[in-house]
Image: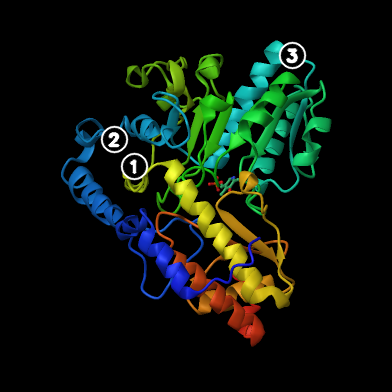
Amino acid sequence: MTTKQWTLAACQEMDARDPLAPLREQFDLPQGVIYLDGNSLGAAPKASLARARDVITQEWGVGLIRSWNTAGWFDLPRRLGDKLARLVGARDNEVVVTDTTSTNLFKLMAAALRQQQDKAPGRRVIVSERNNFPTDLYMTQGLIELLQSFGGAQYELRLIDGPQDIDAALTDEVAVLLLTHVNYQTGYMYDMADVTARAHAKGAVTVWDLCHSAGAVPVDLNGSGADYAVGCTYKYLNGGPGAPAFLWVHPRHQESFWQPLSGWWGHARPFAMEPQYDPHAGIKRYLCGTQAITSLAMVESGLDTFAATDMQQLRAKSLQLTTLFMELVTQECGEFGLVLNTPVDTRYRGSQVGYEHPQGFAVVQALIARGVIPDYREPQIMRFGFTPLYIRFEDVWHAVATLKQILQTREWDQPQFHRRGTVT
Ligand SMILES: *Cc1c(COP(=O)(O)O)cnc(C)c1O
């Protein structure tokens, strides 16, 4: 790291020269808050309120049932999928926005296992990481249990400790490699093309979780040769709390199977009301049932906040922000025993920075009380997310200054900061 001394004035200068600075205007950010948790729930675009009002008062209120056709509700999962595709290196008709990440993962894991079952029936192992986001592991465990409980195949979920163990884990038993592209705890980012090629060389297919990648870092699904991907829209894509997730299937796999949640929205002719399931051609077969239209509509406002920029520009600013944060923490908070858990090498860094500290939970609560909002993840991790659409370099300065004060004065050591809510 550099030995340059950062100052508030230098940070303000960076803001003055930042070509993305005007994009912040698109967001409704509360006064006096520095929001470093866009990696958990993105901030509200100003356009979302108007959009939600229009959906409720006009499309629903006035249009009523007619809006399925006249307001384009029925085609929304696919149309938004096309819009989102550009941010993750996908093309038209490869992505749908629908359901949750957890549900979509179940569909894709089932599809990936069926694909392998046909090609290489002896492969019965799914490899993932011990510190993958738990729902990815839980959904896989549920699928394995389901397959087994009807006298079917015995699959095994094998967990590795980290990227260094991938090659050793890719044996000829492995059917699927399930990875989160940017790790939620550490911010470590995989080289998707490289890992995919290594998996393919060993006969495994890849399922990528893009929850901390979509809208945060450049992703090139087609260029990487990836097989399947899921991700959420409520984090860096600013789609709103619980907004529907997305899924991508490479065209070479789309029509091999139909996924097991074979609801009527994935049927070739949903309104023919036929008794027999017949999957829609292409990506639409990955839909299940009626969508949460109000929430889905707001995903579009989130996606539109990217319209005036691209992922390369955003990546450049994201790395400047995370690097500045790391350097400032070293400069200002060096004596407080914070342990960086995020790669310094920018090739392997997402858009977040984590520090471990024995009192991490209380420190994060004290920061929130002062209007600086990061979040806390077990074990001991203070997680700071940097959304280049609306975070300023000056915000980074103030966030670190506040962190320093809290650590210096032990402000965190008050009973109210040790109390845990249901959601941390
Ligand atoms: C946020 C996140 C999820 C969330 O899944 P939901 O079904 O939306 O609750 C899943 N996987 C990863 C890696 C995440 O970061």
Amino acid marked by disc 2: Trp
Total labels drawn: 3
Amino acid marked by disc 3: Ala
Amino acid marked by disc 1: Ile
The image's mark for residue 412 is none
Front position in the image: 166 or 135: 166
| SS for callout 1 | helix
Could you say where residue 169 lies in the image, as x and y percent from the top left? 81, 32
Mark positioned earlier in the residue sequence (1 or 3): 3
- In this rendering, would 297 be left or right of 41? left
- In this rendering, would 335 be left or right of 24? right
Gap in angstroms between the C-alphas marked 3 and 2: 40 Å
| SS for callout 3 | loop
Tell me what residue is drawn at x 32 percent, y 21 percent.
271
Front position in the image: 12 or 409: 12
Disc 2 target residue: 73
In what quadrant of the picture does the C terminus appear? bottom right
- Pointers 3 and 2 in contact (C-beta within 8 Å): no
Mark positioned earlier in the residue sequence (3 or 2): 2
Disc 3 target residue: 120
Would the CB of label 2 be found within 8 Å of ligand 1? no
- Circle 1 Cα neighbour tier, 10 Å, few/some/many (<14 / 14–19 / ≥20): many
Tell me what residue is drawn at x 48 percent, y 57 percent.
38
The image's mark for residue 293 is 1
- Pointers 1 and 3 in contact (C-beta within 8 Å): no
Instruction: Name which quarter of the figure residue 405 lies in.
Output: bottom right
- Pointers 2 and 1 in contact (C-beta within 8 Å): yes
